[in-house]
Amino acid sequence: MLMFSTACFTVMMMMMMMMVMLVSVKVNGYRSCIESERKGLLELNEYVNNNTDFPYDWSNATNSDCCRWERVKCDLTSGRVIGISMDFTDKPPPLLNLSLFHPFGELRILNLSFCSSPWFDDIYGYKSLGRLKKLEVLDLSNNYMNNSVLPFLNAASSLKTLILQGNNLDWTFLLKELKSLRNLEVLDLSMNQFNGPVTGFADFHNLQGLDLSNNDFSGSLQNTELCQLKNLLALDLSENKFIGPLPHCLVNLTQLQVLDISSNQFNGTLPSAIRNLHSIEYLSLSDNEFEGFFSFELIANLSKLKVFKLSSRSSLLRVKTEILWQPRFQLSVLELQNCNLETLPSFLQHQKDLSVIKLSNNKMTGEFPSWFLEQFPKLWLLLLQNNSFTMFQLPRLLLNHTLQILDVSTNSFDQRLPDNIGNVLPNLQHLNLSHNGFQGKLPSSFGEMRMIDFLDISHNNLSGTLPKEFLIGCSSLVILKLSYNRFRGQIFPKRTSFEKLYVLVANNNLFTDIEDGLRHSKYLSVLDMSNNNLQGVIPSWLGEFRFLHLSVSNNLLEGIPPSNLFNITNLKILDLSRNKFSGNLPSHFNGENMSLLYLHDNEFTGTIPSTLIKDVLVLDLRNNKLSGTIPCFVKNPIILSLLLRGNALTGHIPTDLCGLRSIRILDIANNRLNGSIPSCLNNISFGRSLGYEFSYDLGSFSFGDESLGVHSRLLILPREFSRSQPDDLAFIVEFSSKSRYDSYTGGGSFDYMFGLDLSSNELSGDIPIELGDLQRIRALNLSHNFLSGLIPKSFSNLTDIESLDLSFNVLHGPIPQDLTKLDYVVVFNVSYNNLSGSIPSQGKFLTLDETNFLGNPLLCGSAINTSCDDNKSTNGGFLELDSQNGDEETTVDMEIFYWSLAATYGVTWMTFIVFLCFDSPWRRAWFRLVDAFISFFKCV
């Protein structure tokens, strides 16, 4: 009996152990992968690492079980490799050998995204992927591949999902090669720059998901082949150029669960057949040109609808908000932007599951709908910007609310911020209150927002000092915008906890001091403190930051700027303008990535270092006390703007400037430059060849997975919300044009900035005819010099010029009649010269008044109310003009005038020589002066 019991116990224990082992295998899979596949992965790893730096080096894996390696997925029961993700985000190999994947006979998922390498297989050639009999998912996104890869895809007949997003494929060739893939269910062709109409889908009967978004497809979709794809569950046509009305046949695809036609040019009214999309869960009609009335009755019976988006670029779309019905759906996302809404849709009272609400760019007034926060406990994104709300009130307390993003910018709020804002909304990550009229101090409860990483309270009437609770509590802040308020005192005193701060925009306030608290923000890359009341000197520790953008312009700062500011490696923009900085400019300038350097309107002295121009796009040294000559700058093929106006520079204009071929604005006016104008200035582009463009990207700041919103089962849909770089960081270049200073903002504005200003110097000689080659120049100012000779006839080639100023020189001769070809000229000033003849009387000259021609008594024409016919003399080239009193005639012969001038000059010299022949105190003083002069040069 005992033996029987012992045997039973042993059997039971063995069964239990086997069950444990089976459960363990079921849950965790086998302990190791198949050896042949492990060797195959190592061979693949060795090949890749011999040609590039693969970020996931499997040969260094501490675990021998390849199923546990990064980017490898195995079947839990068989241990076979079923998924490999290479993802060459850094540097792909020059060639990719497809035969290295053949050992993985059970491979179902292969991710080769960001791998732009050409493919090859020495054994199987184009049939290589056909060896992977079970391959179902192939991701080739973001490879920028051309058509050379397509013949390989032809053999992958087992494919069900093919992702070709972000490539450079030919549309016609692509569809021809993919026709053999009969099993395709999901096809992603987004971001390929495809254009023309959409055709060629008649044979893809099994498609369930199709993504054509972010291309250049155009034309109408009437009678499109897409309507023949009866099995479609998800269709994304967003961000193309489709036109015309929304085709009725699309809304007859009754199995559709996802339809996104946003960001196209569809117009007309929305078809009533939308009510037939009974399976629809995601419907995006936003950012088109729809017009007419839209009633929610069209979607009232779509019981599965979870996401609804509607907006229009047309101002003619009207949405009916008051209807007596209770919807059958429960939305999670609602977007009604640019819909001319004046009141909130009444059906919102029947919703409970909303997590995303976008009602921006409408006409709603009254109180901020704080009841949203109480009725929708799942709400995490609320956008109400650009409306006309006037009262901002919050509930007393919200428990466990999930709101993370709130934007009420550009409304009409004008009261104090609620004192409890931080207590009610402690989980906010993104808060935008900008462009309102909020008043008073910043509530101390902001310190309760410990999760907030984006805060924009700019463009309000907030005042006072920043509360210490805010400075200590908001330790997660990444972007902070305080600009255009009346904050005062210290910016960040010592006790500040903004250790993650990346962007601080605090311009146009009343701050007076930069304190040590800023030193704790060691990741700070953008700092704009311009237009404040900052005093004293710049702290030397600012040069220890890795700034991309630093601006302290228009303050009361003084002294010599720390030299390390000019040596920050990644600095793109440095603006120290409009202060009281003094001393010499740095002789060693190591900011190799500098793009915009503004040092104007200070008190800098000394000479200009030749290295200061290295690699910059804009160098602005206007209105300082710089002296010496213009240096022979180091070569800079990308400089766009060189501004040296308003200094005390002397000497000639160096011909080295002609080597700066990309310049679009050259301003060296109001100095003491002499000599002639170099004729080689026509080598400078002044817009003839548009080359380098300034791009300034701070990147985007995204949230976690929740920011992706609702997804399709088959397609990845756009994010519900993402943040771009701050829009307050536009740069400005000033240039005198059309008799005034124009400010040009942003990189794209350089396309319109082509100007040369040499005015208010001591330049002499003729105007080079080569300046007529500057066909795209828009402003040319040579005024207030001693230029002589004629106005070049070649100026008629300046067909884009808007402002031409030659005033206050000694030019003579006629105004070339061909200048009437200048169709865009607004300013043409030749006053106070010695010009003669008739003023052109056609084209833009008909719009010029007499102020443009003053001080030229020999000119005539309708612009100055002087008839040329009445004043022509028949006597050998003389021109007779009536004096202003009308009581005498003046006859001028230029030849006699020059002979008289020569005679006077000769008599003066003869008198001086005779004077030296007689002994007198004046004669002795003269010779002593000459002897001293000779002795001085002998010593030298």
Image: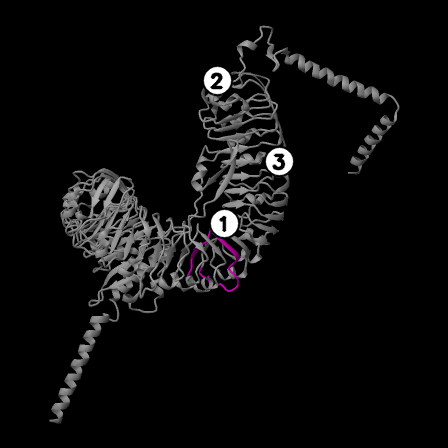
Rendered image: mark on residue 671:
3
Type of amino acid at the residue the image marks with label 1: Asn
Secondary structure of the residue carrying tag 3 is loop
- What residue sits 50% from the left and 62% below the top? 520
Rendered image: mark on residue 335:
none
Q: Where, quadrant-wise, is the N terminus in this rendering?
A: bottom left
- What residue range appears in magenta? 475-500
Q: Is residue 518 visible?
A: yes
Relative placement, left or right, of 913 versus 596 is right
Which is nearer the N-term, disc 3 or disc 1?
A: 1
Q: Where, quadrant-wise, is the C terminus in this rendering?
A: top right
**In this view of the protein, which residue sits in the foreground, 785 or 463?**
463
Q: Is residue 823 above or below residue 493?
A: above
Give the distance between the C-alpha atoms of the residues marked 1 and 2, in whole angstroms: 49 Å
Q: Which residue is mark 2?
A: 841
Few, some or many residues within 10 Å of mark 1 (<14, 14–19, 20+): many
**In this view of the protein, which residue sits in the foreground, 78 or 643?**
643
Relative placement, left or right, of 15 versus 521 is left
Q: Is residue 265 above or below residue 62?
A: above
Secondary structure of the residue carrying tag 1 is loop
Residue 377 on the magenta span:
no
The quarter holding residue 218 reads top left
Residue 493 on the magenta span:
yes
State yes or no: discs 3 and 1 in contact (Cβ < 8 Å): no
Q: Which residue is mark 1?
A: 508
Few, some or many residues within 10 Å of mark 3 (<14, 14–19, 20+): many
Type of amino acid at the residue the image marks with label 2: Ser
Q: Nearer the viewer, mark 3 or mark 2?
A: 2
Percent across and percent down for residue 167 are 30, 46
